[in-house]
Image (spheres, rainbow, N blue to C red):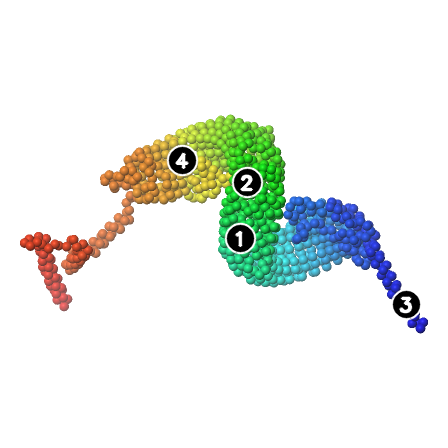
Amino acid sequence: MILTFSSSSCLWFLVILSFCILCRCNQNQDDVLCKATERSALIQFKNKLIDQANRLSSWTGNDCCSWSGVVCDNFTGHVLEIRLRGPDDGIKGHCHGSFDTDDELEEASKQMLGGNISSSLLKLVQLRYLDLSCNDFKLIPIPAFIGSLENLTYLNMSKSQFGGEVPPKLGNLYRLRVLALQDDKANSNLHSNNLRWLRNLKQLHHLDTVGVNLTEASDWLQVISTLSSLQELYLSSCSLTQIPSDPSTVSFTSLIVLDLANNLFDSLLPGWIFTLHDLEVLDLTGCFSRGLNPGTHGGFRSVPSLMTLRVSSNNFVNSYSILDWLSSLSNLRVLDVSNCNISVPILGSLQNLSLIVHIDVSNNQIVEEIPKSLSNLCNITTLDLQSNNFSGDVSELLERFCECESPKLELLAMRGNYLIGRLPRKLGRLKNLSSIDLAYNQLIGIIPDSIGSLSLLKIFQMNINGLEGSIPETIGDLSSLEFLDLSFNKLNGSLPESIGQLGKLSFLTLHHNFITGIVTENHFTNLTSLGTLWIGDNKLTFKLNENWIPPFQLSVLRIGSCSLGPRFPSWVQSQTMLTDLDLSNANISGVIPNWIWTTFSAVTYLNISHNNIQGKLGDVSFLTPAAVLDLSANHFNGLLPSNFSKLNLDFLDLSYNNISGSLDQYLCSEIQEPQMLRVLNLGHNNMSGVIPDCWIKWESLVILNLENNRFSGIIPSSLGNISSLESLVIRDNRLSGSLPVSLLNSKSLVILELSENKLTGSIPALIGRESTGLKLLSLRSNKLEGNVPDEICHLSSIQILDLGHNDLSGNLPRCFGNFTVISGRETSSPIVLYDTLFQNQVLGSASLVTKGRLSAYSTILYLVTTLDLSENQFSGSIPSELVELPGLRYLNLSQNNLTGSIPNTFREMRQLESLDLSLNHLDGKIPSSLSSLSGLSFLNVSYNNLSGRIPTAGPQLQTLTGSSFAGNALCGAPLAACQPNNDDTEGTNDQFDESNAIDWILVIFTLVGLVVGFWIIIVPLLVSMRWRNAYYHFLDKMRIKLQDVILLIFPCFRRRKPLPGTISFTNQVQEFELSQYILNTDYKQNESFSEASSSTQQVQ
């Protein structure tokens, strides 16, 4: 009994004791779990950090285990983990540069920790996990003491702006399984001279040194291959250049991920990569430009487990065998072969990869019709085919994507191909689409209403196609839309007001369409995120309240060629953040408001040209350096402000205004540093004075246009020393003096236009001594004299040479065949003098006299080829070399003293459109070769000494009027008809015209034919009686048959029955002839029979 009680008491005692201990433990755990020494260490660690956003505000109190980012052991209380990763984009885990806006990046920067890392962390003896990634430590070195935290299994210091050498003491962390030291790829702040310290990390299965400079670590592969547990290896952008090809150096057979991207190895792709049979992810982006090792067998077929393959920016991919290997990768999910210079078809070999979700073949040269079977890949999320030569109709492909049971397509990019078709009516079924880019194709049709169902769509780019119809109202339902570009299409109708509901829209471009109607405040109601508004070159009329304040702050506003006037739009004043402003051709008139010169602070593009704005030029100091300023085609007056030279602009166009004064205050200011101005156009103003010689600091000038002003004096020779100058136009001024040789020999000049001045002297014989690219030289309407030197033909690139209306004399040069384009030996290309993306493009332009009238050429100037030597004193004959130029379109030799005949070799000038030889002393005939020129639409040979018939062989000359031939002794249409004795003189000129030359081959063959015919036909008739009889008999039978046929067809020729009592003399004659013929025939037949019998007897 006592024992029983004792046993029971002991049992209860143990239960109560255990309960008390447990309660005490729970009480201690609830009170304080953290070790005091480790709490103190964490406080010291915090004090060394810079925490702008107060992320560590919870690091107070005694229990460090409850602090943010700290994880403790539940039983021992030791700190096991510190997780202080900085902010990222929240989706892909990226940091530094992955944020959509500057505001987001600025806010993220505040969230990043900085400062120094305290060695107090050494007191955390059980620390196993340390993550300080995505912070900003301002290039301090990674502390070497971290290598003493020997219990660490996870260390992540990636993208935290550490600098210097990776401490080799990290090799002491023998328990480490994950080591991530990823650096900024662009800057490579971290480096390591060797990787031998990695040998001790036998348990490492994840190594990430992306962006770390390993240039000096030549033994990287030998070291890493000793890590037998390694499964994931990330070495992209490590500046590696050498990779061993010997497979014996590689032993990490367990590798699942291999990333060697962007290292530019100076060798062929080694074959050992294809022995890693367990690989699932392989990234060789931009590594092996030299190609594949010839001894490689099997290739990607030897890696059947591959799920992700990225080999973009490599040339070795452009191979049928490589692409054939891809078709065998049945497990492939992600394929990136972009920018590989692929020209062979590829999509056909991918259509059987049923598991694939990501295809990127962009930026290649693939010529292939898109297979419709591609639409069977209903699991695909990314299809990027942009910038290739794909063709075909995509209508059915897109339709079938829409018919997938659960379409997963997120990104569709096919821009820059030759695709046709339409957007499917059921486009809205692709619910997951976030990006559609079909720009730069040939798609037609309308934008379907169903597009409003794409609630996740962020990017919609259809620019440069042939879309028609109106923008659907449902566009306003795209609540996620950020980027909308429908420019350069054929859209019409009005702009839907629903577009004003796109609260996330930041980029809206609809320019170059046919959209009409009124734009009101309702179109912008909720566009609070809008930064770019480019809807110019439509037929829109803005009717906005004068006091309206937009809900957005634009950086780009381009609404040129819309109707905004007549007043300057006051709401623009609220857009203080503008960098691009285009209000050109907007029907604005009146004086420009003062706020336009003071509101903005950083404008790089300002275009208010082609309006009716008046007043003086204001202070444009708000323009940034290298800005574009276009105020042309207005009514600005006054002097050119001297402070313009302080702006250091890139483009300045003040043409077609009323600017007066001289250039001195602008060009010759006290500023000494070189100016970056490339385009200066002051043409068509009222400026005067001399052109100053202050060009030494304008060394970047490409285009200088001072035409149609009142400048006088000489042309400064220093203009020819501007090494970048391509176009110099100073026509229609009052310049005098001689031609500067430096201009004529400029290596950079393409256009030199000095016409309509008072230049004197001769064309210098030094012209063309230097190799030049001059394509247009116009010295028209000056006072030049003397001979044209043959050296002018050294300007081999000339397409347009205009020396008309001067006092030049002598014979015409015979060397124009040296001009390569005019002679047809080279083709011309557009003359693009200035081209800045999304700003201005300036093409070469000129005013030329063609077809008897002055015409302006710009866009097609490069197609014009002209020789104009008219209105001079040239004498002598027209050299045949001058009319043997297949590339020449316009030739004008009128109003000279030329003599002799018109050369007959015009048939070589297949492109000739205009020929003017009027008012000379030419004689002879018009060569018939002129009528063979199918393109000739203008001809003037009037007032010469020409004679004979106007050629009628072709239709070209028959369409001309009589004035083209007046003042000659010519006849025939369109002039008076020729007299009979002139009928045989049409277009003849025996001395010169090849068309009338004797064809001796024809004569010889004719004579041979006559001789052969004589011996075959005539001689047998003379020798053989039988031949004569048979021949005459045959002719008579033919005569009788012919007579019967004629009488049958024409009864009127039948003999009438003679009247009674009269004698038909004709009948008697015919009867007599017939009887004589019969007698004759009988006699000859008897004679022939006798001869035949005699011959038979002799044979017997």
Q: Amino acid at mark 1?
A: Pro
Q: Which residue is mark 3?
A: 10
Identify the residue at image location x=85%, y=60%: 23
The residues tagged by marks 3 and 4 sit, at their Cα atoms, a distance apart of 127 Å
Q: Can residue 650 be seen here?
A: no
Left or right of 357 in this view: 819? left
Identify the residue at image location x=88%, y=64%: 16
304 w.r.t. 873: above or below: below
- Foreground mark, 1 or 2, reads 2
The residues tagged by marks 1 and 2 sit, at their Cα atoms, a distance apart of 27 Å
In terms of depth relative to the viewer, which is nearer, 121 or 448? 448
SS type, badge 1: loop
The residues tagged by marks 3 and 2 sit, at their Cα atoms, a distance apart of 97 Å
Identify the residue at image location x=60%, y=37%: 547
Left or right of 1066 in this view: 759? right
- Label 2: few (<14), some (14–19) or many (≥20) C-alpha neighbours in 10 Å: some
Residue contact at pointers 3 and 4, CB within 8 angstroms: no
Q: Which residue is mark 1?
A: 448
- Foreground mark, 3 or 2, reads 2
- Foreground mark, 2 or 4, reads 2
The residues tagged by marks 1 and 3 sit, at their Cα atoms, a distance apart of 86 Å
3 or 2: tag closer to the N-terminus: 3
